[in-house]
């Protein structure tokens, strides 16, 4: 998996987690633990992608 793909997937998963954790906008149809887990995994993927020393 390339660096850019990892960053993009991390950002998408992070956004999905944030939207799932906000029940006020009507998109929170999942358990809060699942949304928090998506936020953590999304952040980790994005950070690893940004910190990877290989060229894209």
Image (cartoon, rainbow, N blue to C red):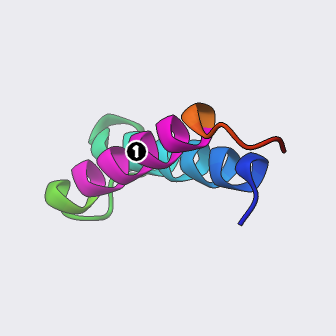
Q: Is residue 7 visible?
A: yes
Does residue 6 appear left or right of residue 35 in this picture? right
Q: Is residue 19 visible?
A: no
Q: Which residues are magenta?
A: 35-49
Q: Quadrant of the N terminus?
A: bottom right
Q: Residues within 10 Å of mark 1 (few under 14, many from 20)?
A: some
Decide whether residue 6 is among the magenta residues.
Answer: no
Q: Measuring from the top left, give residue 17's x and y in whole percent.
A: 39, 49
Does residue 56 appear left or right of residue 21 in this picture? right
Q: Quadrant of the C terminus?
A: top right
Residue located 49% across and 49% down the image: 45
Task: Give 40 or 3, whichever is nearer the viewer.
Answer: 3
Q: Measuring from the top left, give residue 7's x and y in whole percent.
A: 65, 44
Q: Measuring from the top left, give residue 49's x and y in whole percent.
A: 60, 42
Does residue 19 appear left or right of residue 23 in this picture? right
Decide whether residue 42 is among the magenta residues.
Answer: yes
Residue located 31% across and 35% down the image: 24
Classify 29 as above or below 20: below
Element class at badge 1: helix
Q: Most extreme residue toward the right, as rendered?
A: 56
Classify 52 as above or below 12: above
Task: Give 13 or 28, whichever is nearer the viewer.
Answer: 13
Does residue 26 appear left or right of residue 37 in this picture? right
Residue located 55% across and 48% down the image: 10
The residue carrying mark 1 is 44
Classify 1 as above or below 15: below
Tell me the chief SS of the magenta region.
Answer: helix
Q: How many marks?
A: 1
Q: Measuring from the top left, give residue 55's x and y in whole percent.
A: 82, 41
């Amino acid at each position: 998996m390339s660096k850019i793909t990892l960053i993009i997937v991390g950002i998408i998963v992070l956004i999905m987690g944030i939207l799932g954790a906000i029940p006020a906008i009507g998109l929170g149809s999942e358990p809060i633990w699942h949304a928090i887990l998506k936020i953590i995994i999304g952040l980790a993927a994005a950070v690893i992608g940004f910190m990877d020393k290989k060229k894209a």
